[in-house]
Each structure stands twice: as C-alpha cells, then as structure tokens.
Image (cartoon, rainbow, N blue to C red):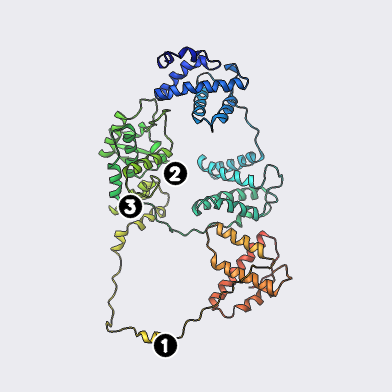
Amino acid sequence: MLAEIRPQSYHDYLALPILGPLLDEFTIWSRTRGYTLGTVKNQLKDTRHIVRFFESDGLHDLKKLTQADFEKAWQFFRLDKPSVAGTIRQLECFIDSVHGLPALSPSPKTRSDLELHQFSDYLKRVRGLVDSTIQSHLNYLHRFLELIAFDSNQKALANLRLTQIEEFLHCLSQSLNRDSLQHVMGYLRSFLRFEYSRGAIEEPLHEMIDSPRLYRLEKLPCSLSWKVVDELLGLIDRTTPQGVRNYAMLLLTAAYGLRSCEVVSLKLDDIDWHKAEVRIAQTKNDNQLILPLTDTIANALIDYLKNARPDLPYREVFLRVRAPHGTLKSTAVTEAFQREVRLSGLDIPYQGPHCLRHSFAVHLLREGTSVKEIGDVLGHHSTESSCVYLRLAIDDLRCVTLEVPECLDANVEINHNILKDLPPVRTLRSSTPAGPPRSFLNERINGYLKLHRSLGKKFSREEAVLLSFDSFLASHCPKVSEINGAIFNEWSETLAAYTPTDRRNRMRIIRNLCLYLKRSCRIVLFLTF
C-alpha cells in the first residue's frame, strides 16, 4: 500500500532507519482503522521527524525501542508539533499490538498509593461501590494527601488538624460549586472515618467537618418543552452518517429517558426485533429494563444500522464515526447533543443531554403517568427522586390554586393621613467597629468566616456580629487570652437594646464560633448558656 500512496518516494520511506521496514504494514493498519488517505500521508511525513529524534537519542535498532522511548518522544513533540506527537502514539499502538513492545517498568508505589489502595479495597468489599465511584473518591483524596504531605511525613494523619481540612476545602471551593463540593466532603468524611476506625487518627475528625449549605429542592431540574425537543430532533441533518447516528442516540435519550452511559452501552443483542422490545441495562441500580420498541425508534435504528454504522466486529450499536473506529464513551452523547444544538440555532441553555431525560419525565407526568411508573422507567431507587419533576408541571399546579376571596367591604379605604402621623420606625445602629478588630480572636474569626464562605454561605450578618464581639473583646478585655462565662455574660449585657429573638440569635452565633474554636484550635472555653 505504501507504493500506491507514495509511488515516487516509497523507496525513501522504506530506507528510513529504525521504522522504515514497518511503514508499509503501518499504512495498511492505519487504513483498516478508518484513517483517511490524507491523514496516512501526513503520518508518513511525521515519521521522518520521529526517526531523527530516535537517532539523536542514541537509538538505532527497532528491537531496542521501548514504551519509555515513545513516551520521551511524545513529551518532546507534544507542545511544538502536536501532529507528530499524535503519530507517535499511533506508531506505539501499532508496534505494541502487532509486534509487541517492552512494557514500562512500573513506578514504585508511594505511601499515598498504598494507603488509598487499602481504602479502595474497603469501599469495594464493605460498601459495595462500583469502580467509577471509587475512582472519583481517589482522585480527590490524592490531592488531599498531597496537601498534608502524607508521603514525606510519617505522622501526617496522626497530627492532622481541622485547619488543614479547611485549607483543602477552601482550595476546592475556587473551582467547584456547592453540589460538587458536598460530594467531595462526603469522600473526605468517609476516608477520615475509615482512618479513625483503624486508629490512624486519634480524634473523630469526620464528625467535625462542615458541609456546604444546600437547600432541598432549591434548583429545578433542567428541562425543555416537548415542542423544543421535537424541533431539535427534526433539525438534525440525517444525510450524513454522523447525523444519522446522533439522531438515533438523542432520540433514544428523549423517547426513553436513557442516561448517556446506557445509550453507548446498548448492544445489538439487546434489541429483540421479533418481540419489538429493547433491553436496557441500568447502570445505577443494576437492573434490566424492558421497553417497547416503537416504530419511530425502530426506523431510526434501522436507518443507522443499514446506512451509517461502520462494518466492524463490535456488538455495541453505536460506534465512532471518526478514526480510529471503535466503541464510544459516555461523553460522545454530550458532544453529539452540543453539536446538534449548535447547528440547529435553537436557544437551548443546557450543555448536556440530561435535559432530554428530564423533559421525558415531565412529558410522561403531563400525559397522566404515575410518579411510581416514571421512577421505574428512569431507574430511580426512591419515589422521592421522581417527585422532583412534579415541580415542573406548572400548568397542572395552576389548576389546584385557590381563588382569591372578594373583599367583604369594598368601601374600606386606607387613610394615608394616619400613616403620616405615625412616628418613624427606630432602627438599631450596627455595632460593627469602624477600624479593624484587635483582639486575640482576630485571625481565628477570619478563618471561621473563610471556612463558611468556602461552603457557599454569605455569612454577612454573622460577620457583623462576630466583628462586634471582636471589638468588644479588644476594648473591654484587651489582656485576656481565652473566653469564659463572665466575659460572655458581660458582652450579653450590651445587647439590651435588641429584641429577645435578636439577642438569642446573636448569642447563638457566638456559641457556634466557640464550638469551632474548641474543636479546631484546642482553646478551652468556659461558657454557660
């Protein structure tokens, strides 16, 4: 094949040192994986740069090449010439799969690797978590162990303090929203509980970690109207193989409410054409869901299987359109959704196909389907997870609103002159000091505010109360180094101008500060409430 691609210079390619004898076989291998003729020609040009690099590195024999050599070459070209770096990866894959390459010597495991290996074994055997969830735990815990210098400090866990956990939390809050931060705090709490049960941590720090403030049902599920869903599916260009595939994938998502991972894992054996059924392996609850194969879905699948699916020995229904040919990842459905939304020109604010799943649930709800049946189709363990879609049925909620009663005496009018004679409402002056606080609690109050704002809390009222308390300590107790009951009672007497409820709330804010100081800074506090 090399002679057909490069009829005039193929002798020069075959004469290249190290890689020359393999280039003809490499071009055939690349073409069978779906690469275009132009891409193969570019790969041949790149081999000249790769050969020069190997020779400059002292390599002259193909049999001495290792994965470490390819890795070194890839690191050299990946920034300045990314196309050459891509060819290096393809050559490495070709030689390893056809001829075999000496594997990289495994790097020695660090203390963090060994510690997290024991924790992952616990998550799998005791808690029964799946590999993807365990990996999500380990990704963030690696960063936490790196922050506390676990590899270099033998007593990093034994001397672990809440201030280090708060520092880790503050770093994560710069890039994660409150929902994601809550998950990470759950990972960390589980790890600390595991270490405490083993005796590696002396104190139950897992019970002292604050979580981000989240309100139940504070956000509505992202959902589109069924009319917009129909418009999006209708605007997909089905004259190209990619459009045919994307239409079938998004139609499955919208018509059955499937997750992205369930779409890409659908196999040819899961479709029973005689019974007109589709078997869905639900990954979250490990159940098998049998759904009817409608005519619309069947026609879309038949069109894809006959006209757009590559003729490859894979059992998965949906395969890659671009080279290299193979199966899809879950992100492929997201990329297909974003592409079709961009080409359609519709004003859809959501970035992922999960909104089609929510739209499907709301559509079923408006068609009169029970919440239990919706939950079974969507694969929810609890009915509560499905009840969230009731909040999206706005038109149905309007039907149950109560009528506004008529006024008993329509002649009653407000006398605005009376309002003018009323005394003005007295407002309390803020006790926030004008200058910076100067008491011994200054830095600890700032750390307390920083922690809670990292958890997504505004904490403006609490800040005013804490700064007022700090100003009181600086002016009335400048020489004290701890808080006792007498100091707290003396400060409480300054709150006489406030209502009982406001006084109680302010005292509660100081109490929460004292609890934080007690568990994090080891300050002995003698408070009597």
- Residue type, numbered disc 2: Lys
Q: Quadrant of residue 411?
A: bottom left
Of 148 and 474, the residue lying toward us: 474
- Residue type, numbered disc 1: Asp
Q: Which residue is under mark 2?
A: 284
Question: Which element carries disc 2, helix, strand or loop?
Answer: loop
Question: Which element carries disc 1, helix, strand or loop?
Answer: helix
Q: Is residue 469 above or below residue 203?
A: below
Q: Which residue is under mark 1?
A: 421
Q: Quadrant of residue 277?
A: top left
- Residue type, numbered disc 3: Val
Residue under the image location 39 percent in, 31 percent down: 320
Of 51 and 8, the residue lying toward us: 8
Could you give the CA–CA distance between mark 2 and mark 1, rounded to whole angstroms?
A: 66 Å
Could you give the CA–CA distance between mark 3 and mark 1, rounded to whole angstroms?
A: 54 Å
* Residue 171 location (% of width, % of height): 58, 51
Label located before the other in sequence (3 or 1): 3
Q: Which mark is residue 30?
A: none
Residue under the image location 68 percent in, 74 percent down: 475
